[in-house]
Image (tube, rainbow, N blue to C red):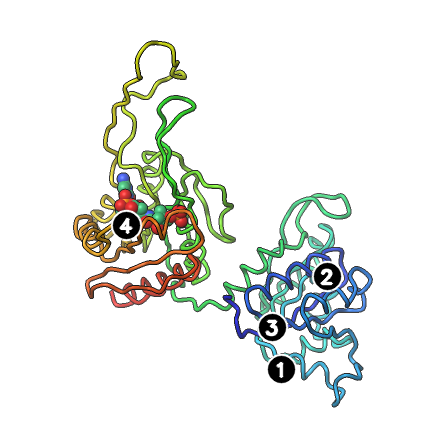
Amino acid sequence: MELLGKRIVLGVTGGIAAYKAAELVRLLIKQGAEVQVAMTEGATHFVTTTTFQALSGKSVFTDQWDARMPNAMAHIDLSRQADLILVAPATADFMARVAQGLADDLLATMVLARDCPLLLAPAMNRQMWESPATQRNVTQLAADGVQILGPASGEQACGEVGAGRMLEPAEILEAVLAFFTPKVLAGKQVLITAGPTFEAIDPVRGITNLSSGRMGYAVARAAQQAGAKVVLVSGPVCFSAPHGVDRINVRSALDMHAAVMARAAAADIFIGVAAVADYRVANRAEHKLKKDTGGVPPIELIENPDILAEVARLKDGPFCVGFAAESQNLDAYAQAKRRKKNIPLIAGNLIQDGFGGDDNRLVLFDDAGAHPLNPAPKSVLARQLVEHIATLTGKN
Ligand code: PMT
């Protein structure tokens, strides 16, 4: 419920992507937002007002002269109540009208009369997007402080391929969440590891662990939404990178070590969330091990480099944050890891709380002692961790 208490006017204009706005309403409401839909006349040719009314639980407005507004000022009343106006999809025509300050229908009038921020998610044919007129309008809108989300590239409804597709509803939701997040890490470069590593025994087998990557991906997303430029070095997981995060895929601890060390000097903050294998296989077989060769194949282990400790030793290196997953004695073991790796902050979690699921329970340990956080979804804990990091790095 990251948008609890936020009032969002969702403007829908007349393009085929209007059907995706229905899913967007559902996602915004799931996060606790109050959504008021306003449609252009064109949009009603693609999706009915009934669809949006059913999903938002509110009457949908399409007409400037709507008799439901006792003072006949729908444009003022609706936009004054909003924390944000989001128009998705925004057609080329609608963007042109907003850029020109036209007020020739309810939605355009609301946009002109607003005293809240405006986000537009363009959706149009690639030639319309690339046309000099649209690009002029985009430049003008950006100069007027309007945030443009996308568009994405890919196959279009008209059969052409190129830039102009509306971002997916989940991506627009991420942009809205980012919009409401205080930018406590603005200007910072944050390097994060996430997920498990995979240490090969032979070409098909390996040693790994049960880290899903959820915690690390949540931290990456929270840092990105807090204004940081985020690079995520990820072991094998089944998620796509959070919107706006630069992901580097790795498999083994050695791969992760190389990817991190190549980028650590440029980072302001390094957060090691990955469950990195402490050991790799020294006698990795080039070919698949056969069962019937007599006896159990011996597996020799050799220690992996400690990535976090190595980054923490860098001269003028980033502010380092570790994670510690323990099955007992969380405080003592996590604090001991913090001291051993010589890092200012470590987030401790119990294995039964942290591995795999959507929720977790974290205790943050720093020079001031232990800061237990309430059990919560990993997304919420990640935001609290980011705020704690921002406070500590702000003091440096
Ligand atoms: O992915 P999820 O399913 O969401 O689960 C999240 C998590 C439980 C994996 C995560 O919250 C967590 O606790 N990650 C750290 C796991 C751990 O116990 O790591 P460790 O004790 O082996 O290492 C301590 C710290 O050193 C960690 O920051 C780790 O990334 C880092 N490390 C460890 C070994 C190594 N060779 N290099 C490292 O950088």
Given residues 291 and 364, the one toward you in this image is: 291
Residue at (59, 73) in percent of width and height: 84
What is the C-alpha distance between the residues marked 2 and 1?
24 Å
Q: Which residue is mark 4?
A: 324
User: Disc 4 to disc 1, how far (Cα)?
Assistant: 47 Å
The residue pinned by badge 1 equals 80
Q: Which residue is mark 2?
A: 91
Q: Amino acid at mark 4?
A: Ala
Task: Determine whether 309 is above or below 227 in the image.
Answer: above
- Tell which circle, 3 or 4, labels the residue nearer the N-terminal end: 3
Task: Report if the beta carbon of the residue with label 4 is closer than 8 angstroms to ligand 1.
Answer: yes
Looking at the rendering, in which quadrant would you find the C terminus?
Answer: bottom left
Helix, strand or loop at label 3? It is strand
Label 3, label 1: how many angstroms apart (C-alpha)?
14 Å
Residues at circles 3 and 4 in contact by the CB criterion of under 8 Å? no
Residue 107 lies, in percent from the top left, at: 72, 73
Label 4 element class: strand
Q: Position of residue 167 (x, y in %)?
A: 62, 54
Q: Residue at x 81, y 68 (%)?
A: 41
Identify the amino acid type marked 1.
Arg
Residue 109, picture quadrant: bottom right
Q: CA distance from mark 4 to mark 2?
A: 49 Å
Q: Nearer the viewer, mark 4 or mark 1?
A: 4
Q: Name the residue located 58 percent from the left edge and 68 percent from the top edge.
A: 143
Query: Picture coordinates of residue 240 (x, y %)?
Result: 51, 46
Give the mark nearer the N terminus: 4 vs 2: 2
Q: Name the residue located 37 percent from the left edge and 47 percent from the top edge.
A: 355
Residue assigned mark 3: 34
